[in-house]
Image: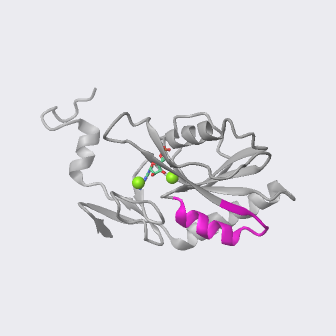
Amino acid sequence: MIKLHDKYFKPFVSAKEIDAALQRMANEIAADVGDEIPVFVGVLNGSFMVVSDFVKKYPKPCEVTFIKLASYEGVKSSDDIQRLIGLTQDLTGRTVIILEDIIDTGKTLAEIHRIFKNENVKALKIATLFYKPEAYKKDFKLHYIGIEIPNKFIVGYGLDYDGLGRDLPEVYQIKQTQHMTNLVLFGPPGAGKGTQA
Ligand code: 5GP
Ligand code: MG
Ligand code: MG
């Protein structure tokens, strides 16, 4: 178990399991693209480890670039995603494969689709190491999925909790305290045990 800021996290996905998922995705993508040289687009910050390990496993020539997005969460509407670094090269006619660390609600993915709408790429495909099917609220197709996980907060392997944990080589899941479980099941203190909306 590890502690980051005020929260505890337990081991959830090992480095070996991550490795196997990335290898499987790399093989699948290589088989699908045939003779094309794809452009892999990493979404910073979270995907830096995914991209680094993925392209080493990818068995054919490829190009790699990054975009950087940030959400205004807690400041403005959480649907507002800011482009900090946009596309810096012409991708007309190219097969573009987005490499994501995790797809949760899909709002980041919606912004990615907005970015590529006017780019005239040949194909836009989405690959993500982690996917939370219970949280996903959009209809965009996810072409390559590494590992499906329950709707619980994870850290490690690029994913942070308030800045910490990105450097961990494996993934940890938040350990819910009795107090937090009560909040989820029964609402705020004073609402009465068993009272549900
Ligand atoms: P979405 O836009 O799909 O709701 O969420 C994508 C982004 O939210 C991810 O790139 C990541 O920054 C953050 N996120 C979603 N779920 C998790 C999680 O379980 N752990 C961490 N550390 N970040 C998450
Ligand atoms: Mg991400
Ligand atoms: Mg984060």
Would residue 147 be visible to someone looking at this image? no
Q: Residue at x 16, y 31 (%)?
A: 191
Specify whether residue 78 is painted magenta: no
Q: Residue at x 61, y 70 (%)?
A: 53
Query: Residue 54 occupies which quadrant of the picture?
Result: bottom right
Q: Residue at x 24, y 37 (%)?
A: 186
Does residue 23 lie above or below 117 as drawn?
A: below
Q: Is residue 49 left or right of residue 28?
A: left
Quadrant of the snapshot with the C terminus: top left
- Residue numbers of the magenta segment: 47-64
Q: Is residue 133 left or right of residue 189?
A: right
Q: Position of residue 25 (x, y in %)?
A: 69, 60
How many labels, in total? 0
Q: Is residue 65 left or right of residue 152?
A: right
The residue nearer to you, when weighing 192 against 125, is 125
> Please, which residue is most extreme toward the right here?
35
Q: Position of residue 170 (x, y in %)?
A: 47, 70
Would residue 76 be visible to someone looking at this image? yes
Q: Position of residue 123 (x, y in %)?
A: 76, 44
